[in-house]
Amino acid sequence: MFHGGQRGPKRALSLTKRRKDRNQEEGKVEPIQIVAGVIFIASVLALITGIVDSVIAALLGVFLMVMGRVMTEVEAFKYVDWNVICILLGIWVIAGYFGKTGIPEYLSSKILRFSRGNIAIFVTLLGGLAGFISMFVDNVVVVLMMAPVVFTVTRQIKFPTFPAVIFIGLCANFMGTALLLGDLPPQMLHSVSGIEFAGFIWHSGRPSSFLILTATYLCVVAAFFFRFVKVYGPQAMPSGTKVDTTSRRLDHFVKDRPFTFIVLFYFLATILAMSLREKLGCHLGFIALVGATLLTLTLEIVGKRREMSTPSFEEILAELDWRAIFFYVSLFALVGGLEKVGIIKALADWLVPYLKQNLLLGFSLLYWATVPIVGLVEHDAYILTFLYVIRDLGTHHGMNPWPLWWGLLWAGTLGSNLTIAGAPALFVALNCSQKEDSCKISLKEFLSYSVPYVLLSTGICFILALLVWVLPFLRP
């Protein structure tokens, strides 16, 4: 009797699992899949509409999935990729110190001098610099660092700040996916695929994210230079204009050289260590946290002895985007719920006939469908979901996932520049310019910059992606 009672529950669980597997093979939808799907869609709709705060919407979605028995609270915790969260925390702490060194402002002042009073050159180069800094620093932080440089000039020359600041926002949101450090999507790709730091430069014997996005970026920036020439015409900075930043030396911006040297040393050392992760045998999140910890510890010890003007650790922590951290934690758990009940695999199975039959057609559909979608919705949730879908296409159906992964990542990043809903950096840039100009920017004027930027960048990137990552894999 005792042994029979023990075998009963196990037999019931086994029958339930077999029934569930059989239903999935037959294409039948399980009730628990409906529950998970409804909760996920409701959470995304709450994010899009802004009915409630995005963090609250995501956390509530996880809570409902746990209460709806989609997953347990322990499973929700395990679905979070804490390695990615640690990467974010570590890099953001280092970037927080880097922003206090004065180096970005110093580089901006050099651009101002190099432009020799030509406004079109000044705006173009400043936007170009913003893109490359955003490979290592959060794009919103880049906008907040660069906008005051624009204001310094516009207040004396009296031209609208909107074109320059919105261009900085567009550029800052562009290059975050070029390397592993700049934004969440490449870190999510690392989580799903296992790609390493160097893989974003060269992967599977061909150029990958950094080289393709850099080539695209340089073309877009050059094209917008000619647009700014038309916008500003022959207008230039008057010869009598006194712009403080052009007459200052490095000491004006870098207040404390020992502090700057320490930050740069740990910044570069952390990047080098992350590029050697495979040889070190550590997770990237661990390396990022160690780099941030050693930097903070060094500044706390050396700073007190030498009386350096360093920001306190509490100040750096206060400036971290904790809302984003909670949102990303919830996002991993939400997508984990979909994966557990089989929705991710079911979606992958449904896409197989369209993607496997013709890679060129499948890649094109995924790429161009992604561009408008991420321009209107929170693109991180969309990208993470389809990263898992593409993974299952490779795992269960023998497809090469990399062309689709790269296409999703690039279209998801470049397409998010379409509206302020897709890119927080654009929201910040718009607010800064409206406040400085004391006028409201119309949607038409905003789209007059964002739409050409997105069409040009996605078009060039699509052609390069086809040449490098799609056509070589087509079956003869």
Image (cartoon, helix red, strand yellow):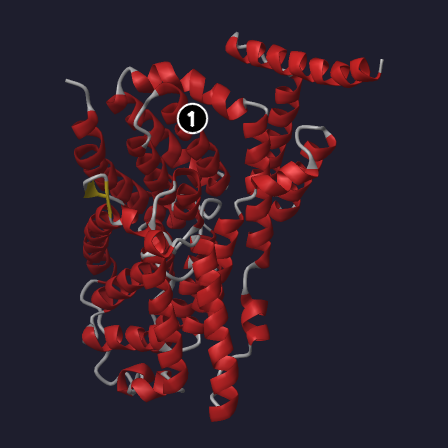
* Towards the viewer: 408 or 193: 193
**What amino acid is labelled 1 in the image?**
Asp
Residue sitting at x 34%, y 16%: 354
Q: Residues within 10 Å of mark 1 (few under 14, many from 20)?
A: many
Q: Position of residue 31 (x, y in %)?
A: 66, 17
Q: Position of residue 300 (x, y in %)?
A: 52, 81
Position of residue 318 relative to residue 344, above or below, is: below
Q: Is residue 434 visible?
A: no
Quarter placement of the C terminus: top left
Quarter placement of the N terminus: top right
Position of residue 99 relative to residue 4, above or below, is: below
Residue sitting at x 34%, y 38%: 411
Q: Position of residue 311 (x, y in %)?
A: 51, 79
Toward which corner of the image does residue 259 lie, by quadrant?
bottom left
Q: Is residue 292 visible?
A: yes
Kindly identify which residue carries mark 1.
392
Left or right, residue 221 beside residue 78? left
Position of residue 290 relative to residue 300, above or below, is: above
Q: Dot 1 lies on which element?
A: helix
* Towards the viewer: 316 or 196: 196
Residue sitting at x 24%, y 58%: 228
Toward which corner of the image does residue 193 lie, by quadrant?
top left
